Amino acid sequence: MKITSDEKLARALLHEMDVTFQRFYHQTLRDVVQDLTVHNVLKTAEPSPQKLLRTIRQTGILQMHSASPVVRLRDVLDRYSSGTLGRCTSCSRRIARKDLLHHPSGLLCSRCRKKEQNRPATKIAF
């Protein structure tokens, strides 16, 4: 069975989510899936990546923590659900698929990211 590019993106996003869950919730994504299955939120312990992302968003699991990486991931999940993940938040151009697969929570296209990196740091006067 061939894996679609949407499924690859969903899997990359789930991997990033797994790291976030381990860091902030002290659970793996597998633990979360098991909990969702036990509580009959998920009908199967092996949902498709897309179904799992929708379920995580619907349950509000990411609402339970206010750390900025969790908030950012919540925003990325909202963008994934609305179909706007993959669009630069600065210029609205498409973000290259390879960049998304490498870093699914990236918000900027390579052009805007380069501009951001080359921007001089603002000096604060005291």
Image (cartoon, rainbow, N blue to C red):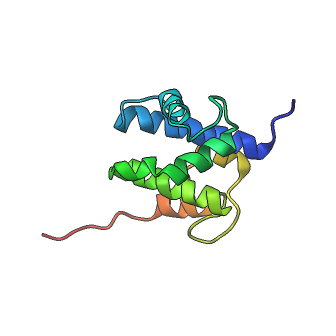
| Quarter that holds the C terminus | bottom left
Residue 10 shown left or right of residue 73 in the figure: right
Please give the name of the residue rendered at 41% of the width and 54% of the height, measured from the top-left corner: 71
Residue at the front extreme? 40
Residue at the right extreme?
Answer: 1
Q: Position of residue 89 (x, y in %)?
A: 57, 67
Residue 102 placement (x, y as % from top left): 62, 41
Q: Nearer the viewer, residue 57 or 19?
A: 57
Could you say which is closer to the camera, residue 48 or residue 89?
48
Query: Residue at 64% of width from left, 36% of height from top?
Result: 43
**Front-lying residue, 111 or 74:** 74
In the drawing, does residue 63 fall left or right of residue 83?
left
Q: Quadrant of residue 124?
A: bottom left
Q: Is residue 74 above or below residue 46?
A: below
- Residue 110 at least partly seen: no
Query: Residue drawn 56% across and 59% down?
Result: 78
Q: Is there any visible trace of residue 90 in the rendered image?
A: yes
Q: Residue drawn at (53%, 52%), measured in percent from left and top?
A: 57
Tally of numbered discs = 0
Q: Residue furthest left?
A: 126
Where residue 91 sits in the image (x, y, percent)? 62, 72
Left or right, 86 with reference to 121: right
Residue 117 image offset from top left, x and y in percent = 48, 57
Q: Is residue 19 above or below residue 77?
A: above
Give above or below for 39 relative to 100: above
Q: Is residue 17 above or below residue 109?
A: above
4, 103: nearer the viewer: 4
Q: The N terminus lies in which quarter of the figure?
A: top right
Q: Is residue 55 left or right of residue 93?
A: left
